[in-house]
Image: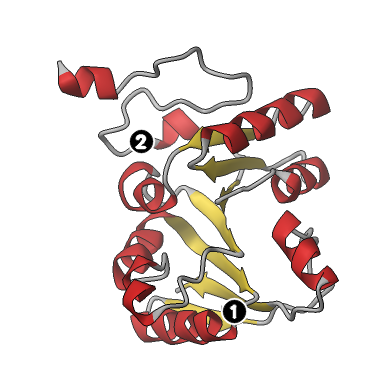
């Protein structure tokens, strides 16, 4: 009974919210994907600006924003609904759990991890999202030649992510030129660039 209670929402689902039928098993591709449409995932989608810009620019692709906080998730759902976008949804869940335990195998064409918490103190490094277990799971959920895009304003975390991802062996780093493809700015990126901070980014392809 406890598992059944945890597996249901204690509120009505919001418009544009993606609610899994079961939070305790890996989804099947048929539950998340639409035929012939690539899926991109935005982990920690914040206020949704990045997600909405991507969805508006690529009507032939589907987008899933993952956000742990209810208030933020609700705000993004409202923005998606007001914009009339039928190719963007929000999953209210923790990012690591989503990748490691929920997303279907070979389902994601591109995963964006933009401006995550760098956990700068040494004793907190174990809380960083880019770890071996996360990368193992990422290999499973990315489609063939799927991409992992990472951005941060924290140079030490950027170097950490480069070392971890390169050492993993399942990813090849590829060029990420400014104009190579449409990549809008996140709310954090706009804020930090206005403060004069430098953004560090890397783009990886599953091999």
Q: Secondary structure at mark 2?
A: loop
Horizontal arrangement in the rendering, residue 128 relative to residue 201 (left or right):
left
Q: Is residue 27 left or right of residue 31?
A: left
Location of residue 170 in the rendering, given as x and y in whole percent from the top left corner: 39, 76
Question: In the rendered image, which residue does mark 2 sit on?
Answer: 27
- Whether residue 7 is visible, yes or no, is yes
Q: How are the residues colored? A: secondary structure
The quadrant in which the C terminus is found is bottom left
Q: Residue furthest left?
A: 1
Of 102 and 119, nearer the camera is 119
C-alpha separation, residue under disc 2 versus residue under disc 1: 33 Å
The mark that comes first in sequence, 2 or 1, is 2
Eyeballing the image, is 42 above or below 174? Answer: above
- 120 or 178, which is in the foreground? 120
Instruction: Classify residue 87 as left or right of residue 3.
Output: right
Marks 2 & 1, CB-CB < 8 Å contact: no
Q: Residue at x 53, y 32 (%)?
A: 70
**Considering only vertical position in the picture, is 206 above or below 81?**
below
> Dot 1 lies on which element?
loop
Please tell me how crowded label 1 is: few (under 14), some (14-19), or many (20+) other residues with Cα within 10 Å.
some
Rendered residue at 37%/86% (across/down): 167
Q: Position of residue 90 (x, y in %)?
A: 57, 35
Question: Which of 204/37 is in front?
Answer: 204
Q: Which residue is mark 1?
A: 154
């Amino acid at each position: 009974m406890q598992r059944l209670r945890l597996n249901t929402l204690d509120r009505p689902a919001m418009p544009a919210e993606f609610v899994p039928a079961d939070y305790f098993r890996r989804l099947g591709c048929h539950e998340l994907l639409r035929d012939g449409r690539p899926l991109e995932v935005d982990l920690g989608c914040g206020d949704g600006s990045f997600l909405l810009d991507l969805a508006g620019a690529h009507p032939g692709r589907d987008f899933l924003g993952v956000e742990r906080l209810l208030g933020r998730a609700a705000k993004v759902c409202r923005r998606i609904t007001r914009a009339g976008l039928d190719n963007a949804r929000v999953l209210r869940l923790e990012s690591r759990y989503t990748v490691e335990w929920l997303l279907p195998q070979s389902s994601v064409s591109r995963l964006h991890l933009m401006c995550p918490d760098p956990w700068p103190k040494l004793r907190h490094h174990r809380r960083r999202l880019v770890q071996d277990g996360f990368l193992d799971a990422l290999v499973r959920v990315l489609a063939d030649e799927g991409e992992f895009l990472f951005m941060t304003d924290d140079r030490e975390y950027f170097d950490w992510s480069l070392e971890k991802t390169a050492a993993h062996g399942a990813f090849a780093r590829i060029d990420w030129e400014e104009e190579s493809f449409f990549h809008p700015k996140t709310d954090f990126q706009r804020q930090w660039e206005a403060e004069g901070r430098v953004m560090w980014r890397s783009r990886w392809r599953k091999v």
